[in-house]
Image (spheres, rainbow, N blue to C red):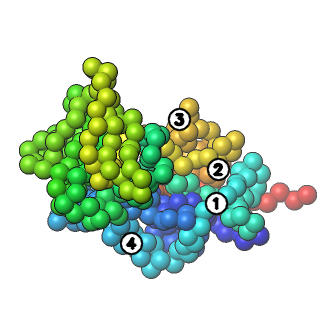
Amino acid sequence: MHARKLIIVGSGPAGLTAAIYAARADLAPLVIAGGQYGGQLMLTTEVENYPGFPEGILGPELMEKFRAQALRFGAEIRDEDVTKVDFKSRPLRLWVHEEEFAAQAVVVATGASAKWLGVDGEARLRGRGVSSCATCDGAFFKEKNIVVVGGGDSAVEEAVFLTRFGRTVTIVHRRDSLRASKVMQQRATTHPKISFVWNSVITEIEGDKLVTGVKLKDLTAGTVSRRTADAVFVAIGHDPNTSVFAGQLELDSAGFVISKDGTRSNVEGVFVAGDVQDKRYRQAITAAGLGCRAAMDAEKYLEALERTPVTAL
C-alpha cells in the first residue's frame, strides 16, 4: 500500500490547480490523472476567455502549462485510472487495478465526459469521421462538408473553429434558436461558411469505412431527409465521471457529486472540485477556482488532523 497525505483524482483545470496549490503547501500530492489527462480542455478548440491569454490559447496547450506548473512545484502525476475506492473507513483507500493507495485526504476532480447521440453508425464510425474533438480531428477535413450537432457555446465554438478547415459547416439543433452566448451566436450566424438546420435531430450516421452523410428528422414536420457530410462533430453536453464513486459518495440523480459548499462531499476528508459537481457554470476558470478551494480546504483539514491528540488505548 502506498500512503500519501493527499491524493487528487483527475487532471483537468480543477485537479491540476488543486495539485499546484497542494504542492506549494508542501503536501507532496499524488495526482492520479486518468488514462487521458487534461479533462475537457483536451477536446476544446481555442480558449479565449481564460485570463492571461489575450490572444487566446488552444485547450491542450493550456493544460500542458497547468501540468508543467504542477510538476514544477513537486506534484507527482500518474496517467492511470482509479478503478476502485473505499471511502467508508480510514485511511481513505483507492486502487489502480491491483495497486492500492491510502490517503488522509482526497480531492475528486474527475470532471465529465462528452455525451454521444446513440444513433446507428455513430460508434462504428467514431474516429472515421465521427468525433467530439474539433482540435484533434478538424484538420483531417480540409475542404470537406462538416456537421456539428448542438446549440450551446461548445457546439458553436466547434463550428466556428471548423470553418478553418471545412468547405461548409452545418449546425444541426433540435430547437429553433441557439443556447450559446450572444457573442458566439453572432459569430456563427454571420459566418459565410456556417448554415443551420433547425428543429431537427440526426437519426443515423451513414458510411461504410468513412462518414458519407447523415439522416435528419424534422421534429416539426416529422419528415426525414438526407444530407451529405464527411464528418460529424457531436457537442451536446457531458456526463459526470463518477461511476467509480457510486455507493461511496452522495450523488444526485444525474450522477454529479453533491456538495453543499462547493468543495466538501458527504465523506469527511473527501473534497470535490470542477465539473464533477458543477452543473451550472462548467467553465475552465470556475473549475480552476474550485480546485484552489478544494486544495486549501484539504490543507486545513490535514492541519487539523495533525493537531488532534491521539487518545491512549
Asked whether 279 or 190 is in front, the reply is: 190
Residue farthest toward the right in the current orientation of the protein: 313
Asked whether 238 or 311 is in front, the reply is: 238
Residue 64 image label: 4
- Name the residue carrying label 2: 244
Q: CA distance from mark 3 to mark 4?
A: 30 Å
Q: CA distance from mark 3 to mark 1?
A: 21 Å
Q: Amino acid at mark 1?
A: Val
Would residue 108 appear left or right of 121 to someone viewing this image?
right
Residue 226 image label: none
Q: Earlier in the sequence, mark 4 or mark 1?
A: 4
Q: Amino acid at mark 3?
A: Ala
> Is disc 2 placed on a helix, strand or loop?
helix
Would residue 281 appear left or right of 310 to someone viewing this image?
left
Image x and y of residue 220, in percent: 28, 20
- Name the residue carrying label 3: 254
Q: Evaluate if marks 2 and 1 touch, with contact meaning CB atoms under 8 Å apart.
A: yes
Asked whether 243 or 20 is in front, the reply is: 243
Q: Earlier in the sequence, mark 3 or mark 1?
A: 1
